[in-house]
Amino acid sequence: MQSQQEFRIETRTWLEQNCPESMRTSMVQEEVIWGGRNAEFANPDSAIWLQRMAQKGWTCPTWPSEYGGGGLDKDQAIVLAEELARINARPALTSFGISMLGPVLLEYGNHQQKQEHIPKIVRGEIRWCQGYSEPGSGSDLASLSTKAELQGDNYLINGSKVWTSYADKADWIFCLVRTDFDVPKHSGISFILFDMASEGVSTKPIQLISGSSPFCETFFDDVKAPASNLVGRLNEGWAIAKRLLQHERTMISGFGLSAGQSDDGGTTSSISSLEGTAMHYRGDSKKLSDPVLRDQIARFKIDADAFAHTSRRSLEESKQGQGPNATSSMLKNYGCELNKRRYELMLQAIGTQGLGWEGEGFNDEELQLTREWLRSKANSIEGGTSEVQLNIIAKRVLGLPDILSLAQK
Amino acid sequence: MALVLSEDQQLLKDSAKNFCEQNAPVSVLRGLRDSKDEQGYDQTIWSQMIDLGWAGMAIPEAYGGFDFGYGGLGVVLEETGKTLVSSPLISTVLAGATAIVQLGSETQKQDLLPKIVAGELLTAIALDEHVIHNPSKIATTATRIEDGYSLNGSKTFVLDGHIANMLIVVARTSGETDSEQGISLFLVDANAKGLNVARTIMVDSRNCSNIQFNNVAVAEDALLGELDQGFNGLDTVLDIARIGIAAEMLGSMQTVFESILEFLKQREQFGVLIGSFQGLQHRAAEMYSEIELCKSSVRAALAGLDDPNTTRAEIAELASMTKAKLSEVFFLVSNEGIQMHGGIGMTDEFDVGFFIKRARVAQQFLGDASFHRDRYATLNGF
Ligand SMILES: Cc1cc2nc3c(=O)[nH]c(=O)nc-3n(C[C@H](O)[C@H](O)[C@H](O)COP(=O)(O)OP(=O)(O)OC[C@H]3O[C@@H](n4cnc5c(N)ncnc54)[C@H](O)[C@@H]3O)c2cc1C
Ligand SMILES: Cc1cc2nc3c(=O)[nH]c(=O)nc-3n(C[C@H](O)[C@H](O)[C@H](O)COP(=O)(O)OP(=O)(O)OC[C@H]3O[C@@H](n4cnc5c(N)ncnc54)[C@H](O)[C@@H]3O)c2cc1C
């Protein structure tokens, strides 16, 4: 076994040789790499960086090398993350395949499914979207009614989803469908994968308050998906669905860590420090002159530090190979609220310059801040609302009785 | 001090409500935004508002107004706040006319106020110079020249600056940049030479601008109020405007709250109305309580303005109390407005987004909660 120190040296050397200079700068929104059939590389170095990282499997460091992943253990993955952070390297690839689908496919998928999909996620060849929420099923996700019926070797899918992030840009969808209408709601759900280019799939973008249109209404009209695309067992999709949500939350809780969040939902770190910004806009040099704002920022930063330690502790406590658990709800909720607080404080720090929408009179960072502040409001809605997280904490972590199931008795 | 509306005020409020709902719903603001309207307000609606007498609401009869007091203007602002009406009501009627009433010479009042009542004159107050409201920190200078003054400097966050015919400019005629002493106000024609007005497109889709003064020459009689001693009068004008804007915020937060309640009573999840969840019920009940406090604060402040016995110090305290409270509660309600609607709350198609955008601008306008808490403490000697 290679020692940690050796691994660190080897990693550092590799990164020094392989990470292009322009990839060692803070991410800008337009250059986030989502991959997929129509991947866009605004900066050509991004393509080189992705190709090199993917070859080592380091876009998905802990995934098994059998399927193209990095095959690193947890400690090695931490070293890699630290070394990437050391040179301020940009993420080579950001995707729902990495943060959501991959982990559950590795856990619940069969060999053939893993072989087909995992390497393409690692290399960023296929871009995935999440078909969970429906107009009538948001927080009560398990009541979903998009229907899948077996016809020969295919499932025939009919129904609609809503708030599907990037459905118009995605190549494939991981989708929750109802395969049995005659059993309690949790027991008739299945988890299926299909190509968004299939006949009968259509999408309609929805505009956000921040001005961009990252999510869609998604319609399925007699869409055919091969029966072999069902993940796990028929009618046992709810367990997979929840597992995936835990991964999603862990990702979203990361917004509470240092990086900001771009208008289209990817993380960027273009925002400079709160305190630095507040001082800059007041012309202060050594000490922030507004004592109230100073107190609020200090309070925020202390919470953020404590949160970062908690995320780290949670990572260290989770056993090798075992994903996040119900505490992911705590992290998700806290991280989101922190991120929203950061943006509100940022607006206070910048004053009226943070109230622009477009055009003259504001610089690019100021305008981006306004949009990101608006976008951050979704953090406590996407991936399950804060209320849902608090309910889960109360029920699953604290063991408190559930009024809904009590009432049904 | 009457904290319930008089019969006349109630009638006025009902008719304003009706007008705003029928003629000036939020979709009008949306349309102005989407069409990138040059004026930033609907001139037909503004003419109708003029016809309704809204521009003369708080102007004495002697100058063509209707002497309905700030209580009257306040209920109108509350209703325009409910549908986010973008109009010169705040810049011209609430702030501009008040400045002229409070500080103007007899000639200035006779000359300008009837024009405001008739909708022939739009004004804008050019005050702030920094990203944080600070009305005594004035670096824009007015220096004596032959026959008048020459203005130099720059202003930001000037409401309706690009549509105003006349600017009311806060400038320094003496003293240090931070001093209340040495501040004077000037009436400046929008076409004056050396004036550069650049409209800024704000998040709330209302009119704002940045203005530069490069040797803008004004005549002797452009002075509004006393030379060097303008701050006190200005502060009164600002306090009245702060109370007026709070009335508008009161209207806006009520719309958001109504929308929340409606949703809680209509959206079903887990087989029940989401309004049956105590996690949401308690927050709604808390918001209700806060909004009730806001209503009382606004009513008390407006009544204080119309009561001739209210002292300058009392007005200042009422203004800071009200603006601080309303800023805090509008912040809360606008955030909950998105959160409690779930995904729909984040969509541009749904109106609540316009309200959170307006909330942040209104919160900062003429001092945010922190500014006013600090001022409140100072006013109360602690
Ligand atoms: C930016 C963004 C991106 C998204 N991307 C995706 C995506 O890619 N794929 C996808 O499938 N979905 C996505 N979503 C949808 C998201 O998961 C849902 O919006 C969310 O689960 C809430 O559902 P809803 O919008 O129907 O709100 P509702 O469920 O109708 O909730 C309304 C309000 O009621 C509250 N509430 C509901 N139940 C309870 C309860 N039991 N106790 C207390 N309060 C309760 C909620 O917390 C909320 O405040 C996205 C949403 C956003 C905003
Ligand atoms: C984005 C998002 C994320 C979510 N994440 C989670 C999560 O991590 N964990 C979670 O529990 N819920 C999650 N949910 C769903 C929601 O929190 C649950 O539906 C909620 O906990 C209420 O469901 P329930 O099972 O308690 O009640 P009901 O749906 O009303 O069910 C009634 C009772 O039946 C039981 N029941 C019925 N069928 C089944 C079944 N097949 N398996 C297990 N129990 C069954 C339930 O436990 C419950 O006691 C999420 C929802 C959204 C929208």
Image: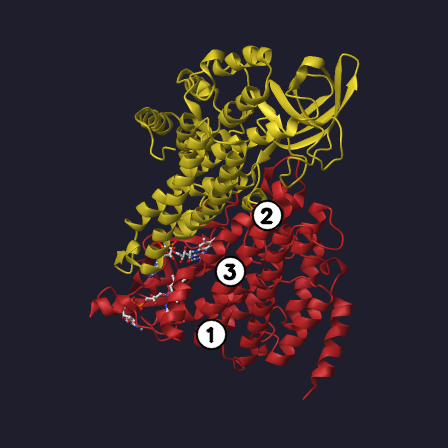
Chain colours: A red, B yellow
Whether marks 1 and 2 lie on the same chain: yes
Amino acid type shown at disc 3: Cys
Which of the 4 image quadrants contains residue B132? top right
Residue B252 seen from this side: no
Question: In the rendered structure, the residue with mark 1 lies on which chain?
Answer: A
Q: Nearer the viewer, mark 2 or mark 3?
A: 2
Helix, strand or loop at mark 2: helix
Helix, strand or loop at mark 3: helix
Q: Which residue is mark 1?
A: A112
Q: Which residue is mark 3?
A: A336
Q: Which of A251/A377 is in front? A: A377
Mark earlier in primary sequence (1, 3): 1
Q: Which residue is mark 2?
A: A347
Q: Position of residue B309 (x, y in %)?
A: 46, 28
Please report the residue visible at 69 percent of the width from the left and 68 percent of the height from the top.
A84
Q: Is residue B312 above or below residue A20?
A: above
Q: Nearer the viewer, mark 1 or mark 2?
A: 2
Question: In the rendered structure, the residue with mark 2 lies on which chain?
Answer: A
Pointers 1 and 2 in contact (CB under 8 A)? no
> Which of the four quarters of the rendered structure image does ligand 1 lie in?
bottom left
